[in-house]
């Protein structure tokens, strides 16, 4: 007996029973669809969060990075002495070092004058610390006193900066300090900051008068070409104080991601949401399958009397679960894709519908439905052929 | 002998609640014979039928069906007997989400050597034989009681079973359609040389029987030859 035969007939019967009661089928599909969309949204937001959290370190142009051990994430750094970074220069493989200053500040919207918080990056423009062309081409202009560049991908609440710049309106306040916006670049926002501006290290210290050049947030180290990064990292490690951590490029990204995943409760919230969605969906599917088996138990008993083995009905229940999973997933995928687009246009964080995500959610939904099916199967035992007639 | 029951005892419940229903049944039915069984309500007719059909487990005496001992048998043996037995129930017991044709096909889907088109063909032939060629694609709820019962006769016979067990098949039908249904059953069974054991309270259909047995208080009380 082939697999096709053992599964084809029970699947066909399950299908015929499911489509016979359209109303109940719609209810069951809605349950799966609901769970599907919920899980897609949770995963979508979670991935978008992690992706956006690393949007800035992603542009870092360096080999090794020094960060204070109390810096949980880039948006809330702890400062350490610049001399710590300078010490790295003693290593022969180190080509150059550069400090990066970070701080949140208020930015007065050009049109509404409303103040909102964004992230300010300050570094020596000649070092090209951020690998963003629009910043690199403006490095000479950035040397001018009180000038900044604005991230075009910031939230719209900061005002239509590009348009206003074209109209010649380029003056605003950052941290209540008057600055001139030279132009825009494209970086992207994170859950921590609604927008970004980049300025020179000197301008940064003017905007934040209580900060000192000696207290830096991130130390960026570039090595000589051909240096073996992990080895140099270990050697530098031995020369640094314990309160600074040294990371490779990949480790900085990982550090940011882990913060949002673990230290911040956000990762947990999304996982919790995913699990809740699956549980709710499972309960709905279980209810449907259970009442289905209950309603059809006379028919199952009849089929048993005709000589159908118990395993046939188990296959039927799993086939029903599988059919519901597919029928709920397909519209769920379509709906979630459009919700992703909607979210992208509303929160300005990329939420791509990837194949990987679709496969992950389908596996979740399938698991949810089959679990519900195996829980409902015990109801089959009530279909004893002898007691029905 | 197709059906050979010897000294069959059967009780429901256990311990002090034991309620004996069958108390030493002897019943032998030859191939192709049509036997009607009557008896008062509660005498154990359905119980006996479910034991013979391999639906209920007996643990006392001997029940040999088509050469297989069903007393203390395993599930496999019972399934084997069920597949060679056509059941007609008091209620039609059709699957409500399947059409008449699909219902009849359910019997044939157990026979894996048939192709789908052979199944369709045989089911259509069977439905035509019970006079339902124009109702093949109707769902049970759109059929009359007599039509449903004829579908279930077609379903029972489509698999060409060696035995037909029928439990009050005419109970829900009026006199005419009841008689028609049983007449069709008899005719088709005779063609295929099928053995029939039919439980009925309906004295109007006794004339189709080769033999009538009566069950009372758990005994085969009287065996009367048809006149
Ligand atoms: N599942 C059961 N559990 C306990 N007792 C049962 C069960 N099924 C039947 N009985 C009892 O067994 C006896 C015989 O029942 P059975 O259904 O075989 O009678 P019957 O001859 O078919 O009656 P009827 O003509 O009313 O259908 C009855 O007294 C009934 O109460
Ligand atoms: Mg009965």
Image (cartoon, coloured by chain):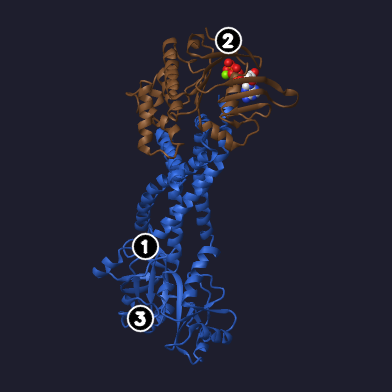
In the rendered image of this protein, which colour is used for chain A? blue
Give the residue drawn at x 41%, y 24%. Answer: B151
Q: What residue would you read off at disc 2?
A: B224
Q: Chain of mark 1?
A: A
Q: Quadrant of ligand 2?
A: top right
**Residue at disc 2, secondary structure:** strand
Give the residue drawn at x 37%, y 31%. Answer: B122
Q: Chain of mark 2?
A: B
- The mark found on residue A155 in the picture is 1
- The mark found on residue A145 in the picture is 3
Q: Residues within 10 Å of mark 2 (few under 14, many from 20)?
A: few
In the picture, measured across the screen, residue A78 lies left or right of residue A138, that is right
Percent position (x, y) of residue B3?
A: 57, 24
- The mark found on residue B66 in the picture is none
Of circles 2 and 1, the one toward us is 2
Which one is in front, B192 or B80? B192
Percent position (x, y) of residue B2?
A: 55, 25
Does label 1 lie on the same chain as label 3?
yes
Position of residue B185 relative to residue A237, above or below, is above
Position of residue A174 relative to residue B179, above or below, is below
In the rendered image of this protein, which colour is used for chain B? brown
**Residue at disc 1, secondary structure:** loop
Of circles 3 and 1, the one toward us is 1
Q: Chain of mark 3?
A: A
**Real-space Cα distance between discs 2 and 1?**
97 Å
């Amino acid at each position: 007996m082939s697999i096709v035969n053992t599964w084809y007939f029970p699947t066909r019967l399950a299908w015929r029973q499911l489509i016979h009661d359209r109303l109940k089928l719609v209810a069951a599909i809605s349950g799966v669809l609901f769970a599907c969309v919920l899980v897609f949204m949770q995963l979508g937001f979670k991935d978008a969060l992690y992706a956006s959290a690393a949007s800035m370190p992603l542009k870092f142009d360096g080999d090794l990075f020094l960060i204070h051990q109390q810096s949980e994430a880039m948006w809330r750094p702890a400062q350490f002495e610049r001399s710590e970074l300078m010490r790295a220069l003693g290593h022969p493989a180190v080509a150059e070092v550069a400090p990066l200053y970070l701080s949140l500040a208020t930015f007065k919207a050009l049109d509404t004058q409303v103040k909102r918080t964004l992230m300010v990056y300050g570094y020596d423009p000649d070092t090209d610390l951020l690998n963003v062309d629009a910043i690199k081409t403006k490095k000479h202009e950035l040397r001018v006193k009180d000038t900044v560049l604005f991230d075009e991908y910031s939230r719209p609440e900061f005002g239509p900066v590009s348009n206003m710049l074209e109209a010649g309106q380029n003056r605003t306040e950052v941290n209540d300090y008057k600055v001139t916006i030279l132009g825009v670049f494209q970086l992207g926002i994170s859950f921590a900051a609604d927008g970004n501006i980049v300025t020179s290290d000197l301008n940064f210290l003017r905007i934040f008068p209580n900060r000192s050049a000696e207290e830096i947030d991130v130390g960026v180290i570039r090595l000589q070409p051909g240096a073996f990064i992990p080895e140099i990292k270990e050697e530098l490690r031995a020369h640094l104080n314990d309160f600074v951590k040294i990371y490779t490029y990949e480790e900085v990204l990982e550090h940011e991601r882990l913060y949002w995943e673990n230290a911040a409760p956000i990762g947990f919230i999304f996982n919790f949401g995913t699990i809740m969605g699956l549980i709710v969906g499972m309960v709905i599917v279980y209810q449907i399958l259970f009442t289905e088996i209950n309603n059809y138990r006379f028919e199952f008993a009849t089929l048993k009397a005709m000589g159908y083995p118990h395993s046939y009905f188990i296959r039927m229940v799993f086939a029903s679960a599988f059919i519901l999973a597919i029928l709920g997933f397909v519209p769920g995928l379509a709906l979630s894709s459009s919700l992703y687009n909607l979210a992208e246009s509303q929160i300005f964080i990329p939420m791509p519908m990837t194949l990987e995500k679709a496969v992950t959610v389908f596996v979740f939904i399938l698991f949810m439905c089959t679990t519900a099916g195996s829980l409902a199967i015990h109801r089959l035992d009530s279909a004893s052929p002898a007691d029905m007639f | 002998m197709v059906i050979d029951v010897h000294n069959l005892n059967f009780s429901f419940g256990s311990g002090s609640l034991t309620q004996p229903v069958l108390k030493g049944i002897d019943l032998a039915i030859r191939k192709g014979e049509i036997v009607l069984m009557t008896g008062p309500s509660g005498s154990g007719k359905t119980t006996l039928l479910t034991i013979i059909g391999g639906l209920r487990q007996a643990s006392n005496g001997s029940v040999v069906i088509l050469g297989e001992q069903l007393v203390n048998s395993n599930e496999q043996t019972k399934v084997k007997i069920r597949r060679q037995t056509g059941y007609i129930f008091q209620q039609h017991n059709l699957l409500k989400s399947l059409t008449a044709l699909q219902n009849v096909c359910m019997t044939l889907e157990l026979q894996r050597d048939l192709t789908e088109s052979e199944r369709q063909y045989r089911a259509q032939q069977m439905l035509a034989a019970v006079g339902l060629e124009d109702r093949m694609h109707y769902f049970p709820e759109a059929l009359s009681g007599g039509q449903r019962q004829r579908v279930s006769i077609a379903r029972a016979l489509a698999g060409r079973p060696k035995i037909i067990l029928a439990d009050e098949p005419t109970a829900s039908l009026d006199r005419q359609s009841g008689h028609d249904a049983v007449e069709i059953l008899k005719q088709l069974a005779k063609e295929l040389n099928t053995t029939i054991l039919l439980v009925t309270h309906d004295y109007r259909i006794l004339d189709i029987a080769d033999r009538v047995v009566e069950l009372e208080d758990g005994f085969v009380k009287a065996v009367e030859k048809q006149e």
